[in-house]
Image: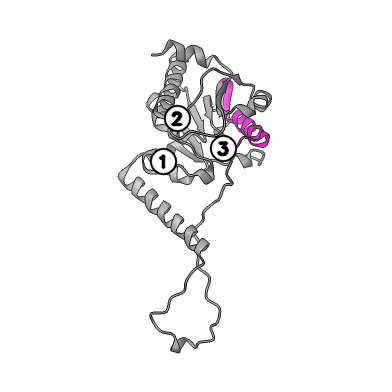
Amino acid sequence: MFTIIRTRSMALPKPESSAVPDEEMSDEETCVLPADTMLILQQFLQEKELKERSEKAGAEPDGCFEENWQLSQFWYNEETKQKLALIVRKLHEQNTSDTFRVALLSAPSAFKHVVNENQQAMLFEFDERFASYGDHFQQYDYNKAYDSGYLEAYANQFDLVIADPPFLSEECIEKLGVIVKKITKQDAKVLLCSGAVVQEWAKLHLGVSMCLFRPEHERNLGNEFCSYANFDVDSILNKGC
């Protein structure tokens, strides 16, 4: 998988004293940044502009932003997004509570479809470009799972969690499990979309088993992708609308 790079705005360092006195320097002379620094700066400025445009126009982020592979982002294809929305709809219909809530963890491309079925849905996502979802967005970092009080405001809030962790490692699945247990209600449903290699870790840390449902992406991935759940996902999808 890819290493996360957190892009931050930066103040350019003041140039060191030059051998040429200031009064002798031409107005046309410029300070040239190293190529890698310039690339990071350009990326930050482009993302800032896209975010501002999205917020101003009220546009959907997954329609404006490309996948960021450095954040291990891979968008679902249309069929998969529709299936996830169907699962949400059916579970909502089965739940008699007026407070049925859905949390999406690191699955931003499915949010638009899911929120159409559950208007209280929340997206927990590391990438702050998706802050244009407003109150439906919570910046999220699974590495903070053991931090005291982390996401305490969302404790015992959600009836269904759909999670797509960024990395295929036991550490990632373990920390995801800590967060899922914190934010879910008792007897909540959990659907994990991840690689086949996490099967044992998913069972151990999330109590979910592999399903026949195979989430698919707009781009083909090198790893075999599967779904895991603590409820009968396949029965819901087989019954359809």
Amino acid on which the number 2 mark rests in the picture: Ala
**Front of the two marks 3 and 2:** 3
Q: Quadrant of the N terminus?
A: top right
Left or right of 4, for residue 55: left
User: Quick check: can you spot residue 96?
Assistant: no
Residue 26's x, y, as percent?
40, 84
The one nearer the camera, 162 or 134, is 162
Which badge, 1 or 2, comes first in the chain's sequence?
A: 2
The residue identified by callout 3 is 166
The one nearer the camera, 189 or 30, is 30
Residue 218's x, y, as percent?
43, 33
The residue identified by callout 1 is 134
The one nearer the camera, 240 or 215, is 215
Q: Are marks 3 and 2 in contact (CB under 8 Å)?
A: no
Highlighted magenta segment, given as a residue range = 167-188
Q: Quadrant of the C terminus?
A: top left
The residue identified by callout 2 is 121
- How far apart are the alpha carbons under marks 1 and 3? 22 Å
- Magenta segment's dominant SS is helix
Amino acid on which the number 1 mark rests in the picture: Gly
Residue 143's x, y, as percent?
63, 41
- How far apart are the alpha carbons under marks 3 and 2? 20 Å
Residue 199's x, y, as percent?
64, 25
Q: Across the whole image, how many numbered discs are drawn on residues?
A: 3
Q: Which mark is residue 37?
A: none
Which badge, 3 or 2, comes first in the chain's sequence?
A: 2
Amino acid on which the number 3 mark rests in the picture: Pro
- How far apart are the alpha carbons under marks 1 and 2? 12 Å
Left or right of 186, for residue 9: left
Q: Secondary structure at mark 1?
A: helix
**Front of the two marks 1 and 3:** 3
